[in-house]
């Protein structure tokens, strides 16, 4: 098996060195960049499995990089772990809105950070544009046939509920903001209020019945499908 490749985009040299050293020691191939422009270019050309992305960077900031990676089919599935400055609570929300898979606030300890990176790399990336059937937590959702089943029984979902469930289920563990979900559910015509997502999610949970807990509310942000179901 070839080594997994990680790109570290961080302008603090000391931090860059620590991350590179520790990730190499864990057996990863590590690429580095110290400004946003260089980082974005490396991500686009080297196509790493994961990018550790500092938020505050010279030339191009981390959010712009994240948005560009997500907007390009070639780089859309690269996992992004965002590093944010201490106590910038708002960045948590912004980071998720821009599509980061996870974030860690500075200052951080190296070992837990590496554990988060490992967890992200274990998470399957799914090319959502190709995947038509999703099976998770007893759910089976077929996008082509437009059917959703729970433990074999068909669910009667509205088109919006169907799209919501499909979006959440194809990437368990990934948090979606309400705005993102609205985009997914409505396509181009995302002019409704974000809160309408809550109404659709409530209706969807009611239809899932005992499996309603597979959709978890992320306070202040949106929703995600759980990776593992809570013990019953
Ligand atoms: Ca920085």
Image (tube, rainbow, N blue to C red):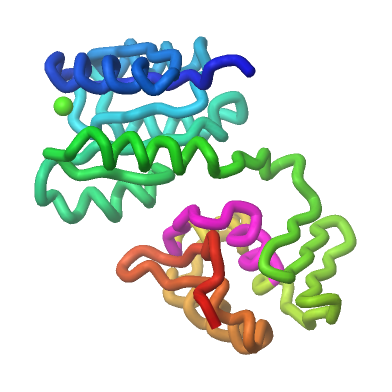
| Count of residue discs | 0
Q: Toward which corner of the image does residue 37 lie, by quadrant?
A: top left
Tell me: 61 left or right of 123.
left
Q: Is residue 164 visible?
A: yes
Question: Within the magenta stretch, is there residue 175?
Answer: yes
Q: Toward which corner of the image does residue 184 lie, by quadrant?
A: bottom right
The quadrant of the picture showing ligand 1 is top left
Q: Report the residue at 42% width, 66% height from top.
A: 222
144 is higher (above) or lower (below) than 85? below
Q: Report the residue at 56% width, 34% height from top.
A: 77
> In terms of depth relative to the viewer, which is nearer, 109 or 164?
109
Tell me: 219 left or right of 174.
left
Quadrant housing the N terminus: top right
Q: Position of residue 98 (x, y in %)?
A: 38, 44
69 is higher (above) or lower (below) than 189? above
Residues rendered magenta in the picture: 162-178
> In terms of depth relative to the viewer, which is nearer, 211 or 91?
211
Quadrant housing the C terminus: bottom right
Q: Is residue 182 visible?
A: no
């Amino acid at each position: 098996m070839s080594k997994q490749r990680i790109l570290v985009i961080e302008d603090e040299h000391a931090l860059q060195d620590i991350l590179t050293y520790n990730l190499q020691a864990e057996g990863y191939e590590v690429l580095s960049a110290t400004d946003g422009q260089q980082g974005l270019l490396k991500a686009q050309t080297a196509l790493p499995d994961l990018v550790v992305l500092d938020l505050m960077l010279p030339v191009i900031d981390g959010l712009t990089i994240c948005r560009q990676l997500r907007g390009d089919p070639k780089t859309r599935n690269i996992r992004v772990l965002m590093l944010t400055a201490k106590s910038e609570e708002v960045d948590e929300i912004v980071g998720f809105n821009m599509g980061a898979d996870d974030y860690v606030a500075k200052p951080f300890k190296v070992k837990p950070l590496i554990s988060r990176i490992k967890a992200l790399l274990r998470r399957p990336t799914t090319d959502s544009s190709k995947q038509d059937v999703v099976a998770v937590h007893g759910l089976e959702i077929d996008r082509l046939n437009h059917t959703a089943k729970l433990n074999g029984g068909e669910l009667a979902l509205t088109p919006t509920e169907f799209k919501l469930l499909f979006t959440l289920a194809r990437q368990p563990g990934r948090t979606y903001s309400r705005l993102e979900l609205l985009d997914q559910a409505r396509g181009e015509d995302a002019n409704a209020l974000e809160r309408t997502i809550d109404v659709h999610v409530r209706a969807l949970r009611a239809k899932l019945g005992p499996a309603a807990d597979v959709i978890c509310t992320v306070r202040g942000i949106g929703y995600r499908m759980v990776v593992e179901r809570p013990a019953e």
